[in-house]
Image: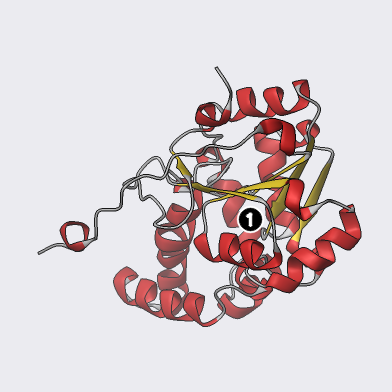
Amino acid sequence: MTMQNAEKVVAKIFPDFPWDEIDTVMLDMDGTLLDKHFDDYFWEVYVPEHYSLVHNISVEEAREQLITRYKAVENTLDWTDLEYWSHELGLDIPELKMRVNHLIGVHPYVVEFLEFCLTVGKKLYLITNAHSRTLSIKLEKTSIGPWFDRVICAEEVGLAKEDPEFWRRLEEILGYDPKRTLLADDTEKVLRSADEYGLGYLIYVARSSSRQPVRYSEKYPSIDYFKELIPR
């Protein structure tokens, strides 16, 4: 039995909330606004290929070694720190990202949703764990930065979004009302930490990658595309 066949089928919980009770919209970047295929390909295929050449090992062996190292720092700021990985792996990670930046793409209906949020007067923030150098590469490629009132990297806050303390520090920076805030993210651990802190409206982005199956959350309302949040 394949892993895909063995996975539990989860029924979709559809979002249902009043927009007039929301002042602030916070959006993750990778997998939420942008197609996560770029990141999956980069870290699971492209980096192992180059790492294997440097260390004279097979690509598969390189991939296995790297995935172990990735998991060791998962949910920490090191995971997204390009300088950390450049030093650890002996590779110029920003340069490698630039070589395949043609794979960076915005999910369908994202721009329409951003336009809707501004039309109805919501504060709009991009909140990402991505390293500032990654953020620069992706904002330059996609041109979505100007839509936001502010863009916040986790390194600016000092914690990853998976830590509930992140949201308290973010509140000090932005002055948002947690109960009147909507957060959309493709990582359930992030939604759980925001839930624990008390954010009022949480949306799970189930189609994070155009190349992977859609996976709905068992606990949080899910969307395939952002058009589902735009009132008809």
Query: Residue pushed farthest left?
Result: 1
Task: Give the percent coordinates (x, y) of residue 176.
Answer: 84, 51
Looking at the image, residue 139 sits to the left or right of residue 229; the answer is: right
Which image quarter holds the N terminus?
A: bottom left
| Residue under label 1 | 95
Task: Give the percent coordinates (x, y) of residue 77.
Answer: 68, 72
The residue at 68%/54% (across/down) is 134
Looking at the image, residue 80 sits to the left or right of residue 7; the answer is: right
Task: Give the percent coordinates (x, y) of residue 186.
Answer: 52, 52
Nearest the viewer among 207 and 46 is 207
Task: Give the percent coordinates (x, y) of residue 70.
Answer: 50, 75
Reply above or below: 228 against 23: above
Nearest the viewer among 27 and 12 is 12
Which image quarter holds the C terminus?
A: top right
Nearest the viewer among 221 and 132 is 221
Reply above or below: 174 against 15: below
The residue at 66%/36% (across/down) is 141
What is the secondary structure assignment of the residue under circle 1?
helix
User: Is residue 188 at least partly visible in the picture?
Assistant: yes
Reply above or below: 197 against 178: below
